[in-house]
Amino acid sequence: MELSKRITGISPSATLTITSKAKAMKKDGIDVISFGAGEPDFDTPEYIKDAAVAAIGGGKTKYTPSIGTVELRQAICDKLKSFNGLEYKQENIIVSNGAKHSLFNIFQAICQEGDEVIIPAPYWVSYTEMVKLSGAMPVIVGTNAADGFKLKADALAKAIRPKTKAIILNSPSNPTGCVYSKDELESILEVIKDKDIRVVSDEIYERLIYDGLGHTSFASLSDRAKEMTIIVNGVSKTYSMTGWRIGYIASTDLELTKSIKNLQDHSSSNPSSISQEAALAALSKEDDSVEKMKKEFEKRRDYMFERIGSIEKLSCVKPQGAFYSFVDASKVNKDSLEFAKKLLEDVQVAVIPGEGFGAPGFIRLSFATSMENIKEGLDRIEKWLRQ
Ligand code: PMP
Ligand code: GLU
């Protein structure tokens, strides 16, 4: 039977494919160093796990409202107020099965066939495919290393057309680690503030920012900016909860939140009731584990950045957030799919090729792995390139 054009038009996820290949090789006893991971290598903090166990014991094992419990949505509002300085009410929040699900639902809700969504490249692998699945067309706007891989206002202005429905911003960024300053976001706002365009602001790495820099949510720039922004966030990265699958949306547009509620009612229903209790604990009883994890990531980032800089033919813009180094390997091979394949075959080091991020010639190295692995992996890459 012929499958739908919708589904055959999308590609497999480069991040998930390589990461699972490296995991399978490890299982087979092969000594693989994986820089593929898009998830913290730390365990979920104990107080969060305890809350989940208590939820099971306490019978919180039934359907909840499909958009999440009142308590969790209130905790998300409290976090948006205390951390981002933003006022939202429970009705502005939709809890989903991870931020990936939140993003998927947003494009389903706002896009028609033929609409366009602007995506700055390098971009996270799933954005383009989710946009395509909604019937809209991704419009890729390139950035460059000299600008820290950040979208410039003039490039954005040139890409806007009558069919532009939204732009995706991801700060800190996966895969580049770039972090937009308030001024940079303001220059973007200046270009779009009089247009009927949404900003889908993926802030999933907001707590992982280094060098003492802070996070600015696009929504916090002005009332107009808040009106235009659909915030996407979740607990996966901040609390090492990737497997629990809790993400959320915040938007002042009640038509939008109502339509996504309807979509969840008829597709996923509620995210796991137990995970919701765990996420509630994560947000409302936070201990020092996030800060400890961040410190460790910063140490690894510094080490990796220095090492990459010392390897001939490789270069990297210093990531300011998230847990990825986005390395220019084009002097070795412009085809990074081939580069990654050979690297894995020859010296068993897994990296994600840049093609999936709209940036051939680059490779993404995650530093969400131990310092020991980072040292060993970089030693292998260095030796391999010398030969
Ligand atoms: N956005 C970005 C930029 C990501 O890197 C991820 C990680 N997979 C997500 C969204 C989705 O996260 P999750 O679905 O685990 O909440
Ligand atoms: N966001 C992570 C990554 O980019 C997890 C994998 C995924 O969902 O794509 O590697």
Image (spheres, rainbow, N blue to C red):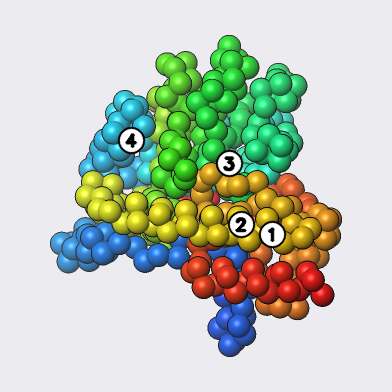
- Which of the two labelled residues, at mark 2 and mark 3, occupies the earlier sequence position? 3
Residue visible at 72% across and 61% down in the picture = 311
Q: How far is disc 3 from disc 1 in space, using C-alphas?
A: 21 Å
Q: How far is disc 2 from disc 3 in space, using C-alphas?
A: 17 Å
Q: How far is disc 2 from disc 4 in space, using C-alphas?
A: 32 Å
Q: Which mark is residue 83?
A: 4
Residue visible at 67% across and 27% down in the picture = 152
- Answer yes or no: do the residues labelled 1 and 2 have beta carbons within 8 Å? yes
Nearer to me, 251 or 267: 251
| Amino acid at pointer 1 | Ser
Nearer to me, 52 or 302: 302
- Which of the two labelled residues, at mark 4 and mark 1, occupies the earlier sequence position? 4
Q: Position of residue 239 (x, y in %)?
A: 36, 55
Relative to 6, say whether 259 is above or below: above
Element on which disc 2 rests = helix
Q: Nearer the viewer, mark 4 or mark 1?
A: 1
| Amino acid at pointer 2 | Glu
Q: How far is disc 4 from disc 3 in space, using C-alphas?
A: 20 Å
- Which of the two labelled residues, at mark 4 and mark 3, occupies the earlier sequence position? 4
Relative to 359, say whether 156 is above or below: above
Mark yes or no: residue 200 visible: no
Q: How many marks?
A: 4
Callout 2 crowding tier (Cα within 10 Å): few <14, some 14–19, many ≥20: some
Judging by the rendered image, the residue that carries numbered circle 2 is 306
Which part of the image, by quadrant, shows the N terminus? bottom right
Q: Position of residue 361 (x, y in %)?
A: 78, 53
Element on which disc 1 rests = helix
Judging by the rendered image, the residue that carries numbered circle 1 is 310
Q: Position of residue 56 (x, y in %)?
A: 22, 65
Judging by the rendered image, the residue that carries numbered circle 3 is 178
Callout 1 crowding tier (Cα within 10 Å): few <14, some 14–19, many ≥20: few
| Amino acid at pointer 3 | Cys
